[in-house]
Structures are given as structure tokens and as C-alpha cells.
Image (cartoon, rainbow, N blue to C red):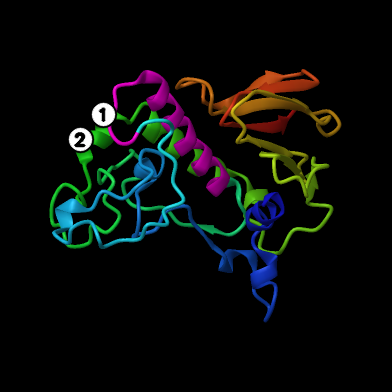
Amino acid sequence: MKGTFATRVSGSSDLYQVNKRRPYHSINFVIAHDGFTLCDLVSYNFKHNDANGEGGKDGTNDNLSWNCGFEGETDDVNVLSLRSRQMKNFHVVLMISQGTPMMLMGDEYGHTRHGNNNSYGHDTAMNHFQWGQLVARKDDHFRFFSEMIKFRRKHSILRHNRFLTKNDVTWHEHYWDNPESKFLAFTLHDEKLGGDIYLAVNAHDYFVKVAIPSPPQKQQWHRVVDTNRQSPNDFVTEGVPFSGSSYNIAPYSSIVLEAKP
């Protein structure tokens, strides 16, 4: 599983490194127009399609979703916090991956269709862009999504026009074949400017203390992303200087470090 994940993050060379194709021919996405929205992906285990008038028989049952402990809408702060973290984790991986990212309209503010995964026939708020919700979430959810997009645009090593070589990436991994391991970390190297980027993703339900590799010479790591932190500390544009040798990564969270002078 981790090997497949790493291949996708790297631009899917197993699929596209033929006929002179490039990483940008790989369209990367977590959510498409069919199925759940990103918010619903982390809020529902099952489809809720009664509004479609087909007795709930339409739409796929294979949503690969997890409701984070409660089905549907809730006021439980812990569940809502986990859902927010998971949406940010998905977005981090999408923006850090080689290839061309694709997002579903509305995921940038957390649009919900209330568990309906086959809503094409509804000309209602279920499918309309909710500008009021975007404004309400502009300083938290939307801000994080926006800043991650800017981060991707800023760093060319996240947008290679060729497939990665061993000089481009270091995988900090020794358990590729362990199906119980849900942690992956790697460093993307910037040979021209030394602005390496370190990413770690922890999908376990417990903390993982990980050794942080040394930054390039005359550089220091700066923490840009920690999805376990509350906004605005979940994304710090200029980065927070980090000089430790290890990082205790929270359950269901991810971090991004950037090497800077």
C-alpha cells in the first residue's frame, strides 16, 4: 500500500513514463465530480441518497470513506477536529505530489452534500457554490487550502517536468512491505537552491516520533505545515525555525518542513 502511495506521489511513472509522457500528464485527485465531496468523505461511511427518489439504490457503495467516529453532522468537537485534520491531510498530499492536481469545486471551503454521492440531478444548494460558507471559513479551512496551493506554485521541485530520480528524493522508509505501517516520510531535494522539502504523513491513531534528517549545508529546517495545529499555526507561510533532531507527529496528521538559510 505504501509503495503504491509513494508511486502516485511521485507522478505515477508506472503509468505515464511511456511515449515521451511527463509527470504533468498524471491528473491527481482525491475527489472528482462523482461521489462524495471531500467533507463528506470524512463525514460519512455510507451514501445517503434518499433525496434522489430511487430508494437509495442509486450511487456507488464503494466510497472508501471514513466518518471519523460519527455518521453525518455532529457537534462533537473531537470528531469535527479530526475531520478538519483529515481534509487538510488530503490536500497536503495532493499539493505535494508530482503531476497535475485537480480539485472539486467547493472542497476549498468544505462543501457538503450531506452524504449524497449521486447528486447530479439537483439544482439546489446541494450542488450550488456556497459563497457564504467560503466567507465564514476564509480564515481557517479556506486559508489553509489557499496557502498550500501558493506553496506548490512557489516551489518548482513540486512540479518537475520529468520523473523523479534517486537524486531528487530520499525515502525515509524501512518497512515498505509492512501492511500495518501507516507512516511515510520523504525529502524532495532542490539541487539548485538547496531548498529541500520534507514531508511526513502519519495515518496511525497514535503519535509517531520520527528522526528528522539533517538539512542541506548552511540551511535550517522551518516548519511550514502541521495539520494537528489550529489555524493559523497549521500553515505558517514564512515557516517556524526548527532545529530538533526528531518530531513527534500527532495521530492522523502531516507535517511539511522547508529548508531555508
Which residue position is annotated with label 2? 132
In the image, what residue occupies the spot 26% across and 51% down? 116
| 250 to the left or right of 102 | right
Mark 2 burial class by Cα count in 10 Å: few <14, some 14-19, many 20+: few
> Toward which corner of the image does residue 261 lie, by quadrant?
top right
**Which label belongs to residue 58?**
none
Instruction: Identify the magenta region.
Output: 71-95
| 233 to the left or right of 170 | left
Residue 84 sits above or below residue 76 on the image? below
Residue 29 in view here:
yes
| 261 to the left or right of 85 | right
Residue at the bottom extreme, as displayed: 19
Residue 222 at x, y percent in the picture: 68, 25
For badge 1, the amino acid type reads: Ala
| Labelled pair 1, 2 in contact (Cβ < 8 Å) | yes
Q: Main secondary structure of the magenta part?
A: helix
Task: Kindly report the distance in space between the C-alpha atoms of the residues bearing marks 1 and 2.
Answer: 6 Å
Pick whichever, 99 or 239, lies toward us.
99
In the image, what residue occupies the spot 35% across and 47% down? 46
For badge 2, the amino acid type reads: Gly
> Toward which corner of the image does residue 80 lie, by quadrant?
top left
Which residue position is annotated with label 1? 136
Mark 1 burial class by Cα count in 10 Å: few <14, some 14-19, many 20+: few
The secondary element bearing badge 2 is classed as: helix
Residue 243 at x, y percent in the picture: 76, 18
The secondary element bearing badge 1 is classed as: helix
Residue 108 in view here:
no
In the image, what residue occupies the spot 58% across and 64% down? 24
